[in-house]
Amino acid sequence: MGIAEALDRLPGASTTAAERFRAALELYEEGVALQRLNFRRRHPTLTPTELDALIDAWLAREPSH
């Protein structure tokens, strides 16, 4: 089953592809914001530039399977 088919089987499947895409982007942004807070908590002395570099490295990592 493909991703689109799986999404269509979720509750609220009457949403359009555009609405699902917007929801996915919002979840992505929330995830990045949460990870930024996590890094800030774990590394309170980082400068904003260093924190941005840490976030960039986290985003660029290869997913583990």
Image (spheres, helix red, strand yellow):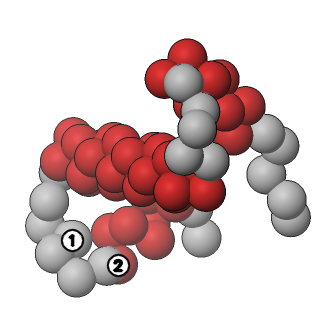
Classed neighbour count for the residue bearing mark 1: other residues with Cα under 10 Å, few (<14), some (14–19), many (≥20): few
- Residue 24 visible in the current orientation: no
Q: In the current view of this chain or complex, which residue is farthest to the front? A: 45
Place of residue 34 in the rendered image (x, y in percent of width and height, measured from the top left): 42, 55
Say which of 62 and 11 sits in front.
62
Q: Give the CA distance from mark 2 to mark 1.
A: 6 Å
At a point 33% along the width and 69% down the height, the residue shown is 8
Mark 2 secondary-structure assignment: helix
In the rendered structure, are the residues bearing label 2 and label 1 in contact, judged by CB atoms less than 8 Å apart? Answer: yes
Place of residue 25 in the rendered image (x, y in percent of width and height, measured from the top left): 33, 42
Picture quadrant where residue 10 is located: bottom left
Mark 1 secondary-structure assignment: loop
Q: In the current view of this chain or complex, which residue is farthest to the bottom? A: 11
Q: Is residue 64 left or right of residue 56?
A: right
Q: On screen, 41 above or below 5?
A: above
Picture quadrant where residue 7 is located: bottom left
At a point 62% along the width and 23% down the height, the residue shown is 50
Q: Which residue is mark 2?
A: 9
Report the amino acid beneath label 2: Arg
Q: Which residue is mark 1?
A: 13
